[in-house]
Amino acid sequence: MKKKLMALLLAGTMLLGLAACSRNTGGSQGAAGPAQSSAPAASEAPAEKDASDVKIALVCNGAVNDGGWNASAFEGLNRIHDELGVETAYSEKVAIAEVPNVLRTYARQGFNLIFGHGAEFGEPMSTVAPEFPDVQFVAVNANVSGDNLSGTVYKFGELGYFSGMAAAMVSETGKIGIIPPDDAPNNKADMDTFELGAKAVDPDIQVMSAFTGSWDDLPKAKECADSLISQGCDVLLPLGDAYSVGVFQACEEKGIHSEGWVSDQHGLSDTVICSGIQSNPDVYVATAKSFLDGTFTPGVGVYGFENGAQSMSEFYGLNDDQKAQMEAAIQDYLDGKLDIPTLY
Amino acid sequence: MNKRVRSVLNSLISVVLALVLAFVVIGILLMWRGYDPAATFLALFKGAFVGKSNLSASLVLAIPLILGGLGIALSFRCGIFNIGGEGQLYLGAFAATWLGVNLQGLPFFLHIPICLLGSMLFGGMWALIPGWLKIKKGYNETITSVLLNYVGLYFVNYTLASFFKGEGTLNNQSPKIQESAMLSRLIPGTELSTSLYLTIAIVILFWFIFYKTDIGFKLRAVGANGEAARTSGVNTGKYLLIAIITSGALSGLAGSVQILGYQHLLVQNFSPNTGYDIISVALMGSLHPVGVALAGFLLGALRSGASVMQIMMGVPVTILYIIQGIVILSVLGFSYAKIDFIGLVSGLFSDSKRGMEKEAAK
């Protein structure tokens, strides 16, 4: 009796397993069906890819709702989905150590173009890229390249310079502060030009810095801001990410000015006098477009003021004279009359 | 029915029921958040088991969990609670990477064993500290080993930001290990390496030593009743020390197989929380080597399936953590309830049988 029962149990388990297998294949066919039906007719160049055959993925180190760096990538991905009709997916809050496996998972699930949003993706991507020669990897903000590996870089240093100028114009104490996460080369470039720009306006100005050691540690950023304020700084620039909010809070409490970074952050806090803007969405859409129409070539693309990917926001906290001075400086830079030492 | 077969069957049934319960709870959670539970579970299942690459990704994640879980199981069975797996794992990985990078010109058949032994030595020595404090001075080993986790983890992170940082790298990571220290891949295009054979061999060896040898018997005796073992002439201190050092060595190995197997360099926080996950694996596997192997594979498959599921279904990563927590909790809950399912079911059957016999007698 008991033996029969066992046999029945075993048979039942095996049947369940079989059922799961057969359902599984059915499911995958079902999933492929509707995707193909939405395919637009492809023509033109032979290298052109059908939007329905392409799947684009985004991997982020932080949260995609951070209102800054990662949010801009997510906006780019959503624009790719809406404007180009491509299937997209994303992973957020992926620790550096887990990046290679997440990249591999995407590659195995048939994604053709995988974005890593940040310089820290350069190294894991150069490890993984050779394993999947048919997949194109793009590390945003990284100076990497390979057969199927590309980097996009901003001209780091441009935004720091103009942010420094604006900060020096507004400062009354003659002390301004900058709060980067660390002194990685890209941050260092903007830190250096922040000081240069400030000194161009006021040669006696003092520039101080405090590192948060993290891209999203909000309380730590607030502590950094508080300590800079207690040193006498009255304009603060967070060179960061989600943690900018912590800096803005400190500035609001002490009634001093701040500057935004990456996107126009005046909406987050009234203390923001202006923001340095990096338009990641434009970089994303441009890359995806060139990938679809077959003109994409692996390599490092440099994006800056000259191609509109970097710009300054409106100058909310400056008077008309100062605004004119800023705009003149930007024009001089575009005309090649002003030299800013940039990273690329 | 044999008593042992019966208990094995009982625990299998309890695992299956636990999984069913866990997935019902998760299904409700998913429905509440607006995801289709059937499609989500299908994505999870596919990501864990279907296809060469998915299955090997599951195994890759399972290998360190099994190795570390065996170590924890040994220490728990012996009555010394080593919670320091995390620190031992990081130090083991550090030792393996350091040897892998800095020993040059060795043939692979020397280089790989040296790296593996180095990691076991470092992990074991790190576990010796709480072990020695416990046996000689009576310090509570759970507290000392947990605190040493932080010391070990941050020490390794510090080395990667300072003297052991690779040249010209942006991220805080070590240089790449030499070719001769890399384990060869079992299936091309996946991360599964020969560490799978190593793991299987260690599971079998562990089982053999623990259940078939004199040392194993004494280890079990010390864990079952230390005082009784001591009065019958077993040097309990010695066996406790053996248990915790072996436990640390296996945790160290859990770290080094990841480096030598597929990561090939050490990154800060390279294996987050594995040192704590191995405790759940050991407990889910009822502290038995075969149970630990199965539990490690289950958790590895869950992890690997979950990452595919997140990609395919867009489920937020926090829900994945909740899912994993529910599965672990449910399996642990059922296994500790120790319900005799076979007894229950066969009891029902024999009652009705007796009833039928009575009918026939009339």
Image: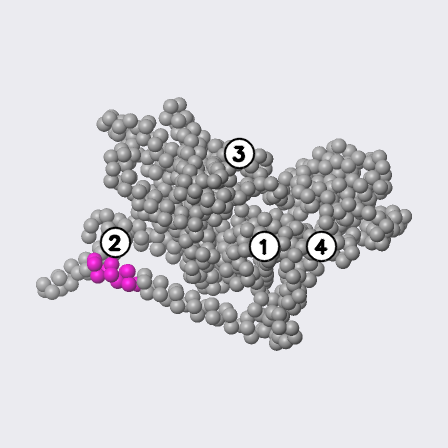
Q: Residue at x 29, y 34 (%)?
A: B219
Image-based side of A274 in relation to B297, left or right? right
Q: Are marks 4 and 2 in contact (CB under 8 Å)?
A: no
Residue A321, position in %: x, y? 90, 48
Residue B93, position in %: x, y? 47, 40
How far apart are the two marked residues, 1 and 4, measured between alpha carbons? Answer: 21 Å
Q: Secondary structure at mark 2?
A: helix
**Mark 2 vs mark 1: same chain?**
no
Write down the residue under mark 1.
A59
Q: Is residue A82 visible?
A: no
Write down the residue under mark 4.
A302
Tell me the chain of label 2: B
Q: Amino acid at mark 4?
A: Val
**Mark 3 vs mark 4: same chain?**
no
Q: Residue at x 35, y 52 (%)?
A: B15
Q: Which mark is residue B342?
A: 2
Write down the residue under mark 3.
B155
Q: Residue at x 61, y 55 (%)?
A: A146
Residue B237, position in %: x, y? 33, 27
Disc on the earlier residue, 1 or 4: 1
How far apart are the two marked residues, 3 and 1, measured between alpha carbons? Answer: 29 Å
Tell me the chain of label 1: A
Q: Amino acid at mark 1?
A: Val
Q: Nearer the viewer, mark 1 or mark 4?
A: 4
Residue extent of the magenta highlight: A2-12
